[in-house]
Image (cartoon, rainbow, N blue to C red):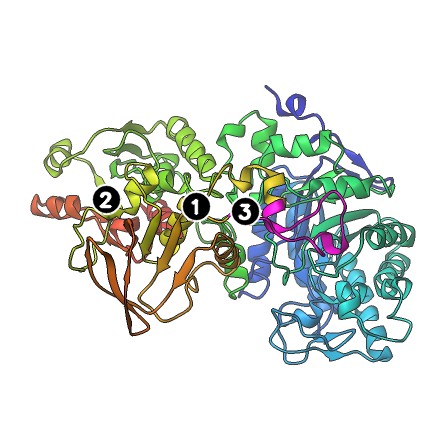
Amino acid sequence: MNGKNKYPHIFEPLDLGFTTIKNRILMGSMHTGLEEAEHGYERMATYYAERAAGGVGMIITGGISPNVEGGAGPKLSTSEEAAEHKLITDAVHAADPDVKICMQILHMGPLARNPEPVAPSPVRSRIARSAPIELDEAGVEKQLADIVNCAVKAQEAGYDGVEVIGSAGYLISTFLVEKTNQRKDKWGGPFENRMRFALECIRQIREAVGPEFILIFRIAAMDMLQGGMSWEEVVTLAQAIEKAGANIISTHFTWHEAAVPTIATMVPRAAFTSVTGRLRKEVTVPLITSNRINMPDVAEEVLVRGDADIVSMARPMLADPELVKKTIEGREDEINTCIACNQACLDHTFTGQISSCLVNPRACYETELNYPMTDAPKRIAVVGAGPAGLAYAEIAARRGHQVTLYDGASEIGGQFNLAKKIPGKEEFYETLRYFGRMMDVRKIEVKLNHYVTAEELKLAGYDEVVVATGIMPRTPDIPGIDHKKVVSYIDVIRGNAPVGKKVAIIGAGGIGFDVAELISHKGKSASLDRDIFAKEWGIDFENHPRGGVTGVTPEVAAADREIYLMQRKDTPVGRGLGRTTGWTHRISLNRRKVKMVNGCDYQKIDDQGLHLTIQGEYQVLDVDTIIICAGQEPDRRLYDALKAEGVEATLVGGAYEALELDAKRAINQASYLAAAV
């Protein structure tokens, strides 16, 4: 079925009067790190052009600072810098003249990564290195003038418009909130004064760029801050922003320092769009909504409900630049869906690396990683249908090789089949759906329930053999490790091992946290129910107190088990988890009363339980079940057998290296190898 008929709201053009946006799907702003990279503008040109060719109606770039104070990264304040940006706008318009591209103006304010960040008041953010310097009145005027100049230079660079970000804890938003704006002059005090800076930005930009230039303001519709903006203030600001000259208002949720997840995979799809829908009734300009909208049916439902006029899908455009094109062509089952893991995108951004995507390593590497058709097709055997094997098989077959994929299990997916069972990680079902469909599209011969032998592979005479057999759980050397109390995390996740009321989990890496989440959870997963999610994280969508959270106590049912999550290292438990998601897992388990213990030295296991020292103090934990999550070792049994048979083979994924289950590394490695075979 033609996607335009199936999703009529998505593909309805949006008339802004002086220009038209061809559909309602926006590629939202994401800072990628290309902005600072060598040849970054050339790489960004290719990156954005691919998304334009993929069918989106509008693109908003990653944030660009108006001046040095606004951030340590790229800025736009001169005609010379505008010329660099023209590489991007020309590439996008060449890919599709109907696609609009707007540049985000981002002044990071107190979050700027420079020695002297500035803000309306010297209030240190919880996540900042130091308190910012308080701007005097001349300083405020300078920042305002620089933001306006940045918009003018963006117009000079060929952008169709700009988005001014007034949320997230960046400069403009810190003027709006009373606890970060303690000024007594015309820029502080009552809300009428606190919103003055935002309004002047929009009013003066509109005056400078004229009427036929898209001007978007990104508002914190629900900032998730205790004592944050009230709903009345949000509405007052939105109405004033519209009057000041904005064509579109983009709703944002949360400040970076807020203790509520809004973009992690544990967040329900489209969880916050009702807030946008409520604001949409208060203004007449179109509204953009965002956050955890990753498939066309979700976007269509949002539009049908009247929650927004435009749907922002940022990370989904990393995962699949052809998402909209595939939707138009009725190929939604071929969309490589964003699973909101953040491992290769936001975790990279916040650690100074170039962003990419766990399920699509080409994202932001379009000039380096490509999959051209081969002129020398080979017969290739891939053994192991986990993340690495699936990625290798799909890309090799896409390039024209004849691929046979073997796995001893009854279904593809490997460790993904464990991940999908963890509450909050249900999106892995989408990745499995995608790869399953690709096996058909690429005409890959898939042999499941088939433990292929080295002898069989040798007799088949393949040109290439790829061993993606994954990992084997490591068994720690603890006396009594074979006691009946001891079970493997694999058996626990699969439901093949009973778990008692008192549990010790040995190993507090990602797998240990997943197991703790699974066995501490009761009832429906919060990621599948917005009301449960809101209750667990203390959000009041109905009454919208200040910030959406002020005075609301999270309600999380304690686990019906006594659980210890334990590690040998003295470092805080969970420190090695992802930068943007680890804190959510720690909070979630803390609220379920899971005891996180470091500095453990395991002595033995017997009928009494687990004998150990904790920070040097001897203890015996009287537990019913001991779950082993103590790392992995590469499973190279087939590889070694192939070597013995004289068959050359390539190791990939966990079979190559198994420091920790790492689908990001496995898929990335497999993609580069398959691109070169």
Sequence-first tag of 3 and 1: 3
Quadrant location of the N terminus? top right
* Amino acid bearing label 3: Leu
Q: Is 554 inside the magenta-drawn segment?
A: yes
Q: Secondary structure at mark 2?
A: strand
Vertical side of 466 occupied by 78: above or below:
below
Gap in angstroms between the C-alphas marked 3 and 1: 39 Å
Any mark on residue 318, and which?
3
36 displayed left or right of 228:
left
Residue drawn at x 76%, y 33% is 306
Which residue is labeled 1 in the image? 560
* Amino acid bearing label 1: Asp
Around disc 2, counting alpha carbons within 10 Å, would you say few (fewer than 14), some (14 to 19), or many (20 or more)?
many
Gap in angstroms between the C-alphas marked 1 and 2: 42 Å
Q: Secondary structure at mark 1?
A: loop
Mark in front: 3 vs 1: 1
Mark in front: 1 vs 2: 1
Vertical side of 14 occupied by 635: above or below:
below
Any mark on residue 635, and which?
none
- Which secondary structure dominates the residues rendered in magenta? loop
- Residue 319 appears in the picture as rendered: yes
Quadrant location of the C terminus? top left
Sequence-first tag of 3 and 2: 3
* Amino acid bearing label 2: Val
Around disc 3, counting alpha carbons within 10 Å, would you say few (fewer than 14), some (14 to 19), or many (20 or more)?
many
Q: In the rendering, at what x and y percent does residue 469 appear?
A: 24, 43
Any mark on residue 467, and which?
2
Q: Which residues are magenta?
A: 535-557
